[in-house]
Image (cartoon, rainbow, N blue to C red):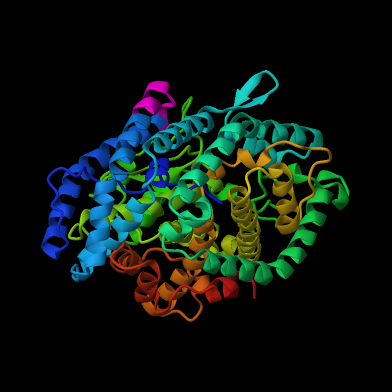
Amino acid sequence: MRMSCRSALFLILGVIVTSAVGLTAGVSQEEFKGFVAAYEARIIPLWKESVLASYTASVTGNDADYQKSNELNLEMARYYSDPELYAQLKAFRDGGQVSDPILKRELDLLYLQFQGYQIDSALIDRITTLATTVEQKFSTFRTKLGDREVADNVVDSILRQSTDSAELESVWLASKEIGRVVAPDVLTLTKLRNEAARSLGYKDYFEMQLKLSEIEPADLQALFDELDVLTRPVFVALKAEMDSILAARLGITPDQLRPWHYQNRFFQEAPSIYGVDLNSFYEGKDPVAIARKYFNGIGLEIDTILARSDLYEKPGKYQHAYSADVDRAGDARIICNLRPNYYWMATLLHELGHATYSRYNDPNLPWLLRSEPHAFTTEAVAEFFGALPANPRWLVEVMGVAPEEAARVAPACKRSFRAERLIFSRWAQVVVRFEQGLYGNPDQDLNKLWWDLVEKYQLLKRPEGRNEPDWAAKIHIASYPVYYYSYQMGQILAAQFADAIGRNVLGAENSYDLSFANDPRIGEFFREKVFRPGSRYPWNEMIEKATGRKLTSEYYAKQFVE
């Protein structure tokens, strides 16, 4: 799974608002227009300044830059927590006089966003400051191997390539040290977030985050239970096959396999076991040039995005990847740490999926609505594009691989991609259910809960005698709370997008054998049916308008399970 976190700013704060100065106290539709106009006058420049500060801090890792970002986050949060503004929004809703569909949608979103910050200002300050501190610790952490510090790219390379169990174990253990560094802060953050949620009448922060993003907790539980039942039998068979191949490669027996043997720090991606080395197609190639060629071919220009982005490794820089929408007016940019390999090719396309979503919004929509209706809809676009570098027909049509070579590796590519999706689905079960347990009872034995879930859903054996906060080593749990379900829902929707484009746009019977390249109609589908609607409609209404059906796991199951 590629890291695709939007800026931490978005997930900590949501949307900010203006002060009460100059706003009337009425409830009419015209008065609400005045509210929105004053809101935009304040929020748009402050939003841009805040996103740029957060972005700069991610690039430099400097204390001063993180301090500036934190100060702006606090300023935004204080506006957002204004009780007079919230009371006025409540009056507009209760009054029922805002009937225009666009204005009513703005009112609904603003009301939910304000509600999440109607908490004590001192508590907001503590949460915001501590969240920024934790984010900086993650950004600047480097794994220590002996007397040298190495970047995550080096750790990942060793885990993928080494066959020395002792080396794999030592590197894997060293990579988990960040968990010990941040765990006390993350636990404090968890309790502070719960305190905030309960002050608003929610059971806990997990419930609050779902409801404020228009997801019912019972619906999410039902979806993940359905996915568990759907994927468990095929995953059990896949895991047994994988264990046999990995054990033979490592010269050990399957019962000796431990988490460090699966070529990934969290077993969230498929190990290379199917006889196809996707890296070989990308070694020595420029991923930026490939991405530019691909997106131009489908009618989505990305030069302006790339020109503003920070794409390569630097000391102190955030080591993962994300996309930031600076102004909702065309300035979208990404952070990556590119290398010429399959992983970073896929990551680059993934992040550019996020960035094109932001870049091609509808400028005629109000500023507030120029964004996705839910985080998982932008994840779906990112997952759609990020899957392409493993597609055999894409290798031919974009990378110039000989058709006979692509045909030779096609079966292995298909098996590998299926394994990647199934493995991620089981990993997502761990993170989502852990967060549910974390916020439900942060005083329980979280180290045990983590490994209980890993064993149940990923079928990995916990290291003997280990009692460390490995859960805290996953950045999402600290800095992007109650977000991970969006990745899994995004993968479900990505399969639905693929089916809709294949059948309705390209006229293909089998959508899953297409390259999705070199046809401007693909870009037009995303631009007109997904990007431009923004958050004008609730997420399921947008999905139905774009694909003809509300969100369903049918297409995901057809592609990866059946």
Q: Position of residue 267 (x, y in %)?
A: 67, 49
Q: Is residue 100 magenta?
A: no
**Residue range of the region highlighted in magenta in the rendering:** 58-68
- As drawn, 280 above or below 101: above
Residue drawn at the location 81% of the way across and 44% of the way down:
250
Q: Position of residue 16 (x, y in %)?
A: 29, 45
Residue drawn at the location 71% of the way across and 48% of the way down:
449
Q: Is residue 361 visible?
A: no
Mark count: 0
Q: Is residue 425 left or right of residue 459?
A: left
Of all residues, the one furthest to the top in this rendering is 147
Q: Is residue 462 left or right of residue 413?
A: right
Q: Is residue 146 visible?
A: yes
Q: Is residue 64 magenta?
A: yes
**Closer-to-camera residue (290/384):** 384
Q: Position of residue 282 (x, y in %)?
A: 53, 47
**Magenta stretch, overall SS:** helix
Q: Position of residue 262 (x, y in %)?
A: 72, 47
**Closer-to-camera residue (395/373):** 373
In the picture, residue 120 is in which quadrant?
top left
Q: Quadrant of the C terminus?
A: bottom right
